[in-house]
Amino acid sequence: MTTTIRTWIDTPTRTINVGGVDFAYRDLGTGSGVPVVFLHHLTAVLDDWDPRIIDGIAERHRVIAFDNRGVGATGSSVPGTVEQMGTDAIAFIRALGLDYVDLFGFSLGGGVAQMIALQQPQLVRRMILAGTGPRGGGGIDKMATIVGAAYVKAALTRSDPRNFLFFPRTPEGTRAATDYLKRLKERTRDLDKGISMQARIAQIRAIRHAGKSQPDDLSLITQPVLVANGDHDLMVHSSHSADIARRLPNAQLIIYPNSGHGGVFQHYQTFLPEALRFLGDDPAHNSKGEQ
């Protein structure tokens, strides 16, 4: 399938029925090579993807971003486990007629990406895991406290909680947060539906369940993986990114300085060339046999 090259702000929202559920998604980019499927963070909908990241990857690759079950404009309800989120994502990918993809998973989406690779390894060529860690990594209760405190600060200051969760409270981090949140508002039409309270609660429960589960055998994920994070991630401690990179047999790790959970957004100008290099910006490298 060849798609028309668009930018994130004007890519139309489409739907596809998957097992009786309408999944909302956006599809843009070159249409050549292996598509890159984006998997999002806690409470996020389509409009929460950074346009600089999406457009940067879409310059060289077909990009597909979607709302998983129960999120945003996608029907049904959010499942209570990350495993089922992975199963739902696989069903969506298959419904599009795709049998080979790259995955870009941020935060919770990184956990979902791991589930996809473990459940259907033949479906995945490469993965980028940003701001995420392994199942059973520990510290899940601390994360819940940090998230709760950030939402209180956001309510008191009438601001977005990602100011406190994604970026350090330094002059550099504050500027990065302002720029990032401004970029999210560039799209003004055909906006996604906001996330429901049921979805928020279910996602938090799924994250807690994953955090307290037994660790996965990540040696089973043999695909190339790029792991990226900031050096001061409050939500998923940066050490978890180092841990997951050590446990994956074919991984490389990038830790960005003076940044947090949203390190790839704060340092997108540095991250994008690394991501494109990893994914293979030469179409000849995007064949199914290349690993």
Image (cartoon, helix red, strand yellow):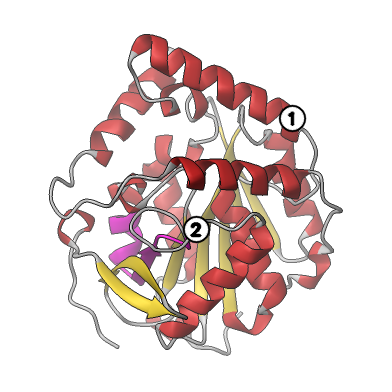
Relative vertical location of residue 61 with respect to residue 136 in this rendering, above or below = below
Dot 2: what SS?
loop
Q: Quadrant of the C terminus?
A: bottom right
Relative vertical location of residue 231 with respect to residue 164 in this rendering, above or below = below
Residue 241 horizontal side relative to residue 260, left or right: right
Q: Is residue 169 visible?
A: no
Residue at x-position 46% and y-position 13%: 153
Q: Quadrant of the N terminus?
A: bottom left
Q: Residues within 10 Å of mark 2 (few under 14, many from 20)?
A: some
Residue at x-position 52% and y-position 66%: 103
Residue at x-position 31% and y-position 25%: 178
Relative vertical location of residue 2 with respect to residue 177 in this rendering, above or below = below
Tell me where the magenta segment starts and ends, as one range: 54-69
- Mark identifier at residue 204: none
Residue 166 horizontal side relative to residue 14, left or right: right
* Foreground of the two, 226 or 2: 2
Magenta run includes residue 61 = yes
- Mark identifier at residue 141: 1
Point out residue 213 in the picture as x, y percentages from the top left corner: 82, 50
Point out residue 42 in the picture as x, y percentages from the top left corner: 51, 43
* Foreground of the two, 40 or 271: 40
Residue at x-position 63% and y-position 46%: 132
Residue indicated by mark 2: 77
Dot 1: what SS?
helix
